[in-house]
Amino acid sequence: MKFICPLIVVDDIEASKKFYTEVLGQEITMDFGANVTFDESFAIQSKSSWTGFINKLDADIRYQGNDAELYFEEEEFDACVERLKKFYVKYVHPVIEHAWGQRVVRFYDPDMHIIEVGESMMNVCRRFKEQGMTVEEIVAKTMFPEDIVEMFLAE
């Protein structure tokens, strides 16, 4: 068995396509109308078709469960955060920095699914190096193995 991708249910397929392509810069690889797959291997499915697949009513589908998210990493994190300001997004929280040093922001898509955009860990390691941290300090902070940190810093 091979896992293919997560799929989330959406009310308005066109609004969701616009959100994922314009706000998050995702490219559509397949568009079947009621089902759309994006280049980062996730898909959206219209609520109207999904309810037929699982033999449920629209009322049985609930959004904003706050129990899962789609996670993206961004090489140009600061530029991404600035770009988000051009769109109406409802934030779960503003930019925070986790204990391991990665900066992230979480917000909702049009159907209240949580989206997380995180700074790539390679860039976290590079940022720490630029701040004067040693490889050993970066390893301790990020919890990444030394060989991975050194690889990130060499690229």
Image: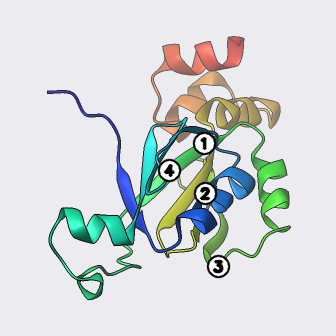
Q: Which residue is mark 1?
A: 73
Q: Earlier in the sequence, mark 3 or mark 1?
A: 1
Can residue 52 be seen here? The reply is yes
Q: Which residue is mark 2?
A: 17
Count neighbours of disc 3 (C-alpha within 10 A) and say few if under 14, some if 14 to 19, many if 20 or more.
Answer: some
Residue 136 picture quarter: top right
Q: Nearer the viewer, mark 1 or mark 2?
A: 2
Q: Earlier in the sequence, mark 4 or mark 3?
A: 4
- Circle 3 — which element? loop
Q: CA distance from mark 2 to mark 3?
A: 17 Å
Residue 141 picture quarter: top right
Q: Are marks 3 and 1 in contact (CB under 8 Å)?
A: no
Relative image position of residue 72 (x, y in whole percent): 56, 46
Give amino acid for label 1.
Glu
Q: Which residue is mark 3?
A: 90
Query: Residue visible at 64% across and 39% down?
Result: 27
Q: CA distance from mark 1 to mark 4?
A: 7 Å
Q: Nearer the viewer, mark 2 or mark 3?
A: 2
Q: Are marks 1 and 4 in contact (CB under 8 Å)?
A: yes
Q: Which residue is mark 4?
A: 71
Q: Taking 88 as reference, is 81 above or below it?
A: above
Q: CA distance from mark 3 to mark 1?
A: 19 Å
Residue 67 picture quarter: bottom left
Q: Nearer the viewer, mark 4 or mark 2?
A: 2
Q: Taking 25 as reference, is 1 above or below it?
A: above
Q: Earlier in the sequence, mark 2 or mark 3?
A: 2
Give amino acid for label 3.
Lys
Q: Taking 140 as reference, is 21 above or below it?
A: below
Q: Nearer the viewer, residue 61 or 141?
A: 61
* In this rendering, position of residue 115 left or right of residue 127: left
Q: CA distance from mark 1 to mark 2?
A: 19 Å
